[in-house]
Image (tube, rainbow, N blue to C red):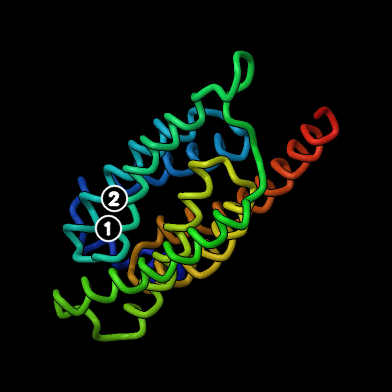
Amino acid sequence: MSEIFDFFFSQYKTYTTTDTTLEIIAVVFGFLSVWFSKLNKIWVFPTGIISTSIFVYLLLKWELLGDMMINGYYFIMSIYGWYVWTRKVDEKQVTPISSISLKEKRTAFILFITTLIVVFIVYKTFDKWTSWVAYADTFTTAIFFVGMWLMAKRKIENWLFWIAGDIISVPLYFYKGLTFTSLQYLGFTFIAIFGYIAWKKSLYKNQLIS
C-alpha cells in the first residue's frame, strides 16, 4: 500500500504544506466551477475565478508557464463570461445556449493557431522548450483557450474542447508531479461528457420552443 501511495504522492514531500493545501483548494473550486457549468449556472465563473487565481500563483512558482498562461486566461475569460451570461438578449432572456457559427469557427481557428505561436514564443524566450512536455503544454493550452472562449459565449461546442484537453491533461499533470490536479482533470473529463449531453438536451428543447 505504501508503494502505491508513494507512486502517486511522493512528489508532495518536496512541497510546502501551504502549497499542497492551496492546490487542493484550487482543485475543489475547479470541480465546483465545472459542475456549475454542466448545470448551466452562473456560479461557474466566481468559483472558477477563485480556482484559477490560486493556480496562477502555484504554477508561476513551479515555473509551469503554459499552465500558468491557461489559468491566467481562464481568469480573464471568467470575468468576460460572467458578463455575457448575465447580459439580456431581450427583456426576458439572457444569452442562451447556442451552436457555433461559421464566423465563430474561423475565429476559433485563428485563436487556436495564435495561441500555439504565442506559447511557443514564451517557452523559447524562457528556454523551457526542452522536452515533449512543452509540446503537450502548447497543444493543450490552445485547446483550452478555444474551449474557454466558447464557454464564455455559451456555445455547446465548448464541451468538445474540454473533453479533448482534459483527456490529454490527466497523464500530463501526473507526469509533472501534480497528482491532485491530474485527478481533477480525470473528474473534469466525466463532467464534461455529461455537460455536453445536458447542454445538447437544453439546446434541442430551446429549438423546439422557438
Residue 85 at what x, y percent from top left? 51, 30
In the rendered structure, find residue 10 and report the number of the disc placed on it: none
Task: Give the SS element for disc 2.
Answer: helix
Residue 106 at what x, y percent from top left? 53, 62
Identify which residue, 28 or 146, lies in the foreground.
Answer: 146
Identify which residue, 11 or 130, lies in the foreground.
Answer: 130
Crowdedness near tag 1: few (<14), some (14–19) or many (≥20) residues, C-alpha within 10 Å: many
Task: Give the SS element for disc 1.
Answer: helix
Residue 16 at what x, y percent from top left? 18, 53
In the rendered structure, find residue 68 and report the number of the disc placed on it: 1
Q: Could one spot residue 29 in this view of the protein?
A: yes
Viewed as shown, does residue 61 lie left or right of 87? left
- Confirm or deny contact between disc 1 and disc 2 (CB under 8 A): yes
Name the residue located 36 percent from the left edge and 84 percent from the top edge. 132
Viewed as shown, does residue 79 lie left or right of 39? left
Q: Residue furthest top?
A: 91
Disc 2 marks a residue whose amino acid type is Gly
Disc 1 marks a residue whose amino acid type is Met
Residue pointed to by mark 2: 72
Name the residue located 25 percent from the left edge and 66 percent from the top edge. 64
